[in-house]
Amino acid sequence: MGRPRKPRPLKIAAGTHRADRDGGAAAPESITLPKCPSWITGYGRHMWQTLGPQLVDLKLMSTAYSQAFVLLCRAYHDWRKATDLIDKHGIFTEPPEEDEVTGKTYLPAKTNAAVTVRDTSFAQMTKLLRDFGLTPSAIGGVTPLESVEAKDPMAQLMDA
């Protein structure tokens, strides 16, 4: 399995975009942040409201990508809630049991179920962040766009 594709806006920003290798995928018709679904609450809604506008500014968000963003926000919500539960109740739900005669532990402690939820949500979040180009490895080759002043071609010839 190879590396996932870099999003087109990041290729353009990095100066590596080539139309002949683009695959002919059409650009999104509108670069807007759709309305947050009502069932996205808490931490997920906060992520929608803070990261969503940043993705619009980077031209990485449109209504066509909203389902992937919904999954990202939901995974973030689940990860934060599971982390809160682990912080409150600990990694283990029951301490290990000891043998009364020898005093040695013979049953391992039971792991909090929130640990599994946290780890799974983290893996989903990492993949989705990479898809949006928001990890250091995904965005490492991007250089900021410089503002280019529009000059009159005739003025450029006269200055030379």
Image (spheres, rainbow, N blue to C red):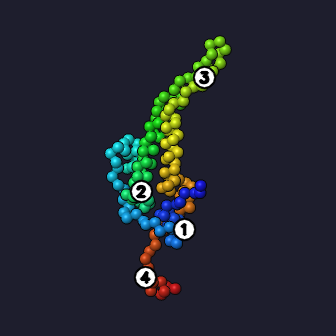
> Is disc 4 surrounded by few (<14), some (14 to 19) or many (20+) residues within 10 Å?
few
**Which numbered tag is attached to residue 61?**
none
Label 1: element kind: loop
Label 1 and label 3: CA atoms lie apart by 56 Å
Q: Quadrant of residue 63?
A: bottom left
- Mark 1 sits on what residue? 16
* Amino acid beneath label 2: Tyr
Of circles 4 and 2, which is in front?
2
Label 1 and label 4: CA atoms lie apart by 27 Å
- Mark 3 sits on what residue? 107
In the image, 30 versus 145, the foreground residue is 30
> Is disc 2 surrounded by few (<14), some (14 to 19) or many (20+) residues within 10 Å?
some
> Where's residue 29, x and y in %?
37, 64
> Where's residue 137, x and y in %?
57, 55
In the image, 95 versus 107, the foreground residue is 107
> Is disc 1 surrounded by few (<14), some (14 to 19) or many (20+) residues within 10 Å?
few
* Amino acid beneath label 1: Thr
> Is disc 3 surrounded by few (<14), some (14 to 19) or many (20+) residues within 10 Å?
few
The answer to the question of whether label 1 and label 4 lie on touching residues, with beta carbons closer than 8 A, is: no
* Amino acid beneath label 3: Leu
Q: From the viewer's perspective, is 11 left or right of 26?
A: right
Label 2 and label 1: CA atoms lie apart by 22 Å
The residue at the point 43 percent across, 82 percent down is 152
Label 2: element kind: helix
**Which numbered tag is attached to residue 65?**
2
The answer to the question of whether label 1 and label 3 lie on touching residues, with beta carbons closer than 8 A, is: no
